[in-house]
Image (spheres, coloured by chain):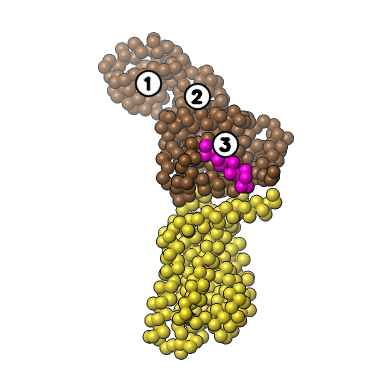
Amino acid sequence: MQEEPGLEAAASVQTAASETHGAHAVQAIDLSLDYGDRRALDGISLNVPQGDIFGLLGPNGSGKTTLVSLFLGLLEPTSGQALVLGRPPAPDVRQTIGVLFQESCLDPNMTVAETLELHGEMFGLRPPLLRMRLEDLLARFGLAERQRDATRTLSGGLKRRLELARALVPSPQLLFLDEPTTGLDPEGRADLWEHLHRINQDGTTIVVATHDMLDADRHSRRVAFINQGRLTALGSPEELKRELKHDSVRLEWPTLTPALLAELSRIQGVGRATWLPPLLHVTVDSARDFVPRVFQLAGDGIRSLQIQESTLEDAYFQMVGRGDEAT
Amino acid sequence: MSSVAFTAQACRALLKRDLRAVARSRSQLYSSLLFPLMILAILGTGVSKGLDPSLVRDGDYSSFLVPGIIVMTLVFSSTFSSASYYYDRDWGMLKVLLATPHEPRVIMLGKSLAGAVIGSGQGLAVLLVAALIPALNLEWQYGVLPGILLAVVAVVMLSLLLNGAAQLVARRIRTMQGFHLVMNLVLFPLLFFSGAFFPLDKLPVWLKVLATINPLSYPLDLLRVAAYANDSGYFGLVVDLLVLGALTPLVFWAGLQRRPPTA
């Protein structure tokens, strides 16, 4: 059988990685990047072990996409180092990387099959193997019947599936996904994550940049919170939630005033209160004790109330902070 | 697989993609042939009848115009091909290609070569059609095969030169509108002062100076010597080949040097 250059390069990168940096698929070492006068990333240091599903969490503009671009070698850091499988992301290292960008990146005039074929050829795959890989991916992602259709005729969900299939053409050891569920309905999201878990079970490390806390909480083994270009927290979702109060209470309270907020924060068992008018988000030891007290304070000012166990989003608000915080 | 073969496969894949795009864009395909032939018919006939025909061989202005029309075809083609950089950037395809295991200059090499192949194909198609029109009298003074070979050299070298120059401009201009504006502002005067539409011999000195420093003049002269003229041309075969041989690799190489911005 013909030797495949992609596999050859991937094997040499893998060997180098295991020799030099053990089990890290991705490393950022005091990584900073400036766009002119603006510091987009500021001294980020983190490791992603091989085989992990790792979430990069943060609001829009926090620096997640910039960080992914540095790992792909699309940007040069101002200082520090970005390492992928133990090496800077030079072209031969990219042989082992798949990527799904945040925005749709498709040539509208190419067909589904041509899109995958071009990508395979760019990764050095040759006809017999390329054909097999394409047929497998087309079948696996339910695109076989649409393979001769121009990508412009696909729905948003199918486009996303095609882009994920394209990212998998080189059988990557490492997959970067930037906001992968953008534009997908709940069924599409579940479908996508099912694919991702299967890929991860096959040994591919997955790094997901997202602002979707629920997805990250459910699917990531470890997460990093990034805010304004800085790393604010790093750990498993369970570790990050451990410090939180048990319950999370969300209130729609248009008549809330700073004085009421200060009073509320003095109630026993109240953790952090984040006020984004008209919404108030409070973590508490026990919602059962807290809710009657808050109704005493608010009178009929509360329009709606929601209680749930604390989530990664609560941890995020606690560590990153937003709005007017009472504590 | 060697790195040369790996790079060659990437370039071939990008060429295939652009050839498919041209084949699918019927308007581009037809207009690339019809427009030059229309200019040839209108300008050639009009000038033959209205201007002093003794300025060109046998008073046959239409045949004189053939090399100029081919150069014009290549100018348009390289502008269209290089504009695909903007489409790729805006569609996000450039980012996808830059994230593959190739240096950015390999991606730009593939795209430039694709543009040069498409432009050369269009230019040679115009030459073929012109050669088949009985009313046009091409001389082929060195014989048909050597003449065709020289014409292919001129067309390919010019196509590479123009695509390299267009890449240079595209790296520095952010919008496609700005790119077209700059290309038109630069290339149209160059086209007019290259001798594409009138012979250089009888021009005033200042226009002759402009023609001499104009890079389009040399492939045009080479094409004219190869297919149309029965003399040694304005600059001469050797000068044409030397200038093209020096300038084309330089400009093409320069066009690949700067990393293309993805946003």
At x 55% / y 20%, what residue is drawn?
A: A239
Spot occupied by residue A16 in the image (x, y as percentages of width and height):
71, 38
State if disc 3 and disc 1 touch (CB < 8 Å): no
Query: Please, what secondary structure does the residue beneath circle 1 have?
Result: strand
Label 1 neighbour load within 10 Å: few <14, some 14-19, many 20+: some
Q: What chain is the yellow one?
A: B
Q: Nearer the viewer, residue A233 or A38?
A: A233
Pointer 2 indicates a residue of which chain? A
Q: Which mark is residue A175?
A: 3
Can you tell which of label 2 and label 1 is closer to the viewer? 2
Please check whether the numbered discs 2 and 1 fall on a single chain: yes
Sequence-wise, the earlier of marks 1 and 3 is 3
Please give the chain letter of the residue carrying mark 3. Answer: A
Q: What kind of secondary structure does the magenta stretch mostly adopt?
A: helix
Q: Is residue A260 magenta?
A: no
**What residue type is disc 3 on?**
Leu
Q: Please report whichever mark, 3 or 2, sits nearer to the chain's N-terminal start.
A: 3
Name the secondary structure under disc 3: strand
Q: Tell me where residue B145 sits by quadrant.
A: bottom right
Q: Position of residue B36 (x, y in %)?
A: 44, 71
Residue at mark 2: A218
| SS for callout 2 | helix
Q: Amino acid at mark 1?
A: Arg
Q: Magenta residues?
A: A125-139
> Which hue is chain A drawn in?
brown
Callouts 3 and 2 on one subunit = yes
Q: Work out how far the residue at label 2 is from the one at label 1, CA to CA, in angstroms.
A: 20 Å
Label 1: which residue? A250
In this image, B9 relative to A264: left or right? right
Let me know if residue B244 appears in the view: no
**Cα distance between the residues tagged 3 and 2:** 18 Å
Could you tell me the amino acid type at mark 2?
A: Arg
